[in-house]
Amino acid sequence: MKKYGVIVLIFLVLLGRMLYLNLGAHAENLNKLEDKIVNYVYGESAPRGRILDRNGKVLVDNTGIKTLFYTKLKGVTVEKELEIAQKLAQIMEIPINDKVLKKYWLLTHNNGDDLIKEEEYELFKMRKLTTKDLENLKLERIEEEEINNLSEEEKEIATIYELMNKGYSYAKKILKKNISDSEYSNLVDSNIEGISTELTWERVYNYGDTLKDVFGSIGSIPEEEKEDYLKKGYNLNDIVGLSYLEKEYEDYLKGEKELYRVNNDNTLSVIKKGKNGNDLVLSIDIEAQLKLESILRENIILAKKRKNTDYFSESYSIVGDPNTGEIIALSGQKLVSLEDETFKSVNTNLINSSFTVGSVVKMATISTGYKYGVIDIGTSVQDGCIKLAHVPIKCSYKNLGKVNDLTAISKSSNYYQFKIAIGLTNQNYKYNMTLNTSIDDFNKLRDMYKEYGLGNMTGIDLPNEKTGIKGSLTSSDLLLNLSIGQYDTYTPIELFQYVNTIASMGIRRKPQLMKEIKAKEEVLKQNDYAILNNVSLDNSYLERLKEAMHLATTSGTARSYIKSEYNPAGKTGTSETFIDTNNDGVMDTKTTSIAFVGFAPYDNPKYSVVVLAPNIYVSKEYNYSKVYITRYISQSIMNFLFEKE
């Protein structure tokens, strides 16, 4: 009996399994089968998210353009597609593609079979020639006269036919964008098989070229990145952010395209509706941005009209909130023509071009002196000159008398910084001494500079950021140069992070352009004001640096760079620079570059500012008062920000 019970149990299990396969799993299996035999395609594009300024003004939007599509009909013949192309050529104008005319000639002349010799066909049968070889022979043997005899309409038909057959057979093909109203009307009336018109989306920039390079570009997926995008679920014909903000925030800005099912007759059914991308809200204030651009251009023109500015053509500035790292406005302007007063925006140079910046680094040098005990609060010396063996004498720009850590910054003493650099080597200065230096001595300065953001990646939310150039040589002369900003180079965005770090009592934050990302009114992501590090100094030293910068703007070299009523702090920088004037690879002309970093109010900072004017004058004939444009730029933009409150 037990034997029969087991047999019955096995039978019941098998019966249950058969019922499941025939009934329960039927729908599941049908779905799996459908997934294998049914094609799905996406719409051409979906609106990307907008880009807005901090006050909600739309900077980058989308515009819908009428676009003509072709969907290949099932079982359609070449003759039928040529007929469709002919109808389209009679309705619309299309730029002719000369490269496809020979292919068209072959289609309309027996596929060019008469151009192949009998012995060549024999070689093809013997597999000594390929189909591609025969195709190339045909194209080579078409007489130019045959192509020249094609009518304009035939050339348009050839171009349209080529567009109809690009890519996958079941994919929708773009034949023409921006079709006119009359073309649209005629296309609708003609009701040509396989032809449809839809809106596709392109970027529109509401403020012209303002910040356009920072927004970045969009386009087809680059060949070298296609695998990465495919893994993320993209299609190879998708439009993506290629650079800067469009690339940085691609995952949020991209829209969701409509999904279509390809029916048996090659028509399409909507399976899933499209969706706009999310909005990117920037920290930029577009009014301040436009004002900063205007200020830079005006002052570049004024300076360029002065003598000895032969190699001066561009200036840079960034303004922001030192407590958060948010950028309110940033601009790089390059003069194209003084006569026409035309400019080119070079905003991306702010993150990927570097400059010698001179004395603006002196707060970081003083910090190094504090850290290693070379100086302390109140340490004073008699300003003078340094003379090392085999090195030309080095001095401040004039004898400044007795200076301490405050006045060394406010009056910009080089001598004070030189003494710190020498102290870092654990040697005492003596006239004409041999100063033995090592890479460790350079690193003491550079490591402290990095704590402030100089010589470091700032982490700004823009791809392709570069650091400045770090000198590779070591010598006593170069160590002294490094201490006054005359050796390594720094980007404007590094200077922005540097001055913000001082203003915020040693807190180094990422500079940011993104304020928040929104899906309609829902906030998806906010700037977290990321802290990268804290400067390794006691607050008493950091307060001392701010006090020194305040002194510089009230009675020192930075006086009047920011109005005294705003209770400012700042530091100027002047550096010797060299340029190649004839593009032979040799730096043949010495120029001077100038810079300024500052913030206000110094005891409760609201705004920070950076200004650079590279190669402002030819060094041997300069005149400070006539070309010191950094003062006017800084003062003008800070006035605007405070008066706007």
Image (cartoon, rainbow, N blue to C red):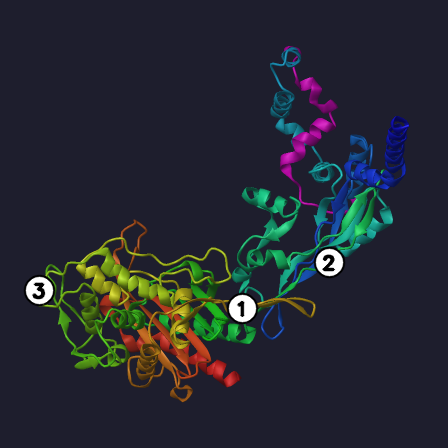
Q: Earlier in the sequence, mark 2 or mark 3?
A: 2
Disc count in the image? 3
**Front one among 588 and 104:** 588
Characterize the magenta stretch by its predominant secondary structure: helix
Residue occupied by mark 2: 275
The residue located at (63%, 23%) in the rendering is 132
Residue occupied by mark 1: 528
Q: Where is residue 440 in the image (x, y as percent from the top left)?
A: 24, 58
Quarter holding the N terminus is: top right
Q: How far apart are marks 2 and 3 (CA)?
A: 73 Å
The residue located at (64%, 51%) in the rendering is 239
The magenta region covers 90-119
Q: Residue furthest front?
A: 1
**SS for callout 2:** loop
The disc labelled 2 sits on which kind of residue? Lys
The residue located at (63%, 37%) in the rendering is 98
Q: Distance between the residues labelled 2 and 1?
A: 27 Å
**SS for callout 3:** loop
Q: Which of marks 1 and 3 is nearer the N terminus?
A: 3
The disc labelled 1 sits on which kind of residue? Asp
Q: Where is residue 572 in the image (x, y as percent from the top left)?
A: 32, 75
Locate residue 229 relative to residue 617 in the image: left or right: right
Residue occupied by mark 3: 432
The residue located at (55%, 60%) in the rendering is 245
Let me know if residue 106 is in the magenta part.
yes
Q: Splitting the image into 4 quarters, where does residue 124 fall?
A: top right
Q: Position of residue 630 (x, y in %)?
A: 37, 74
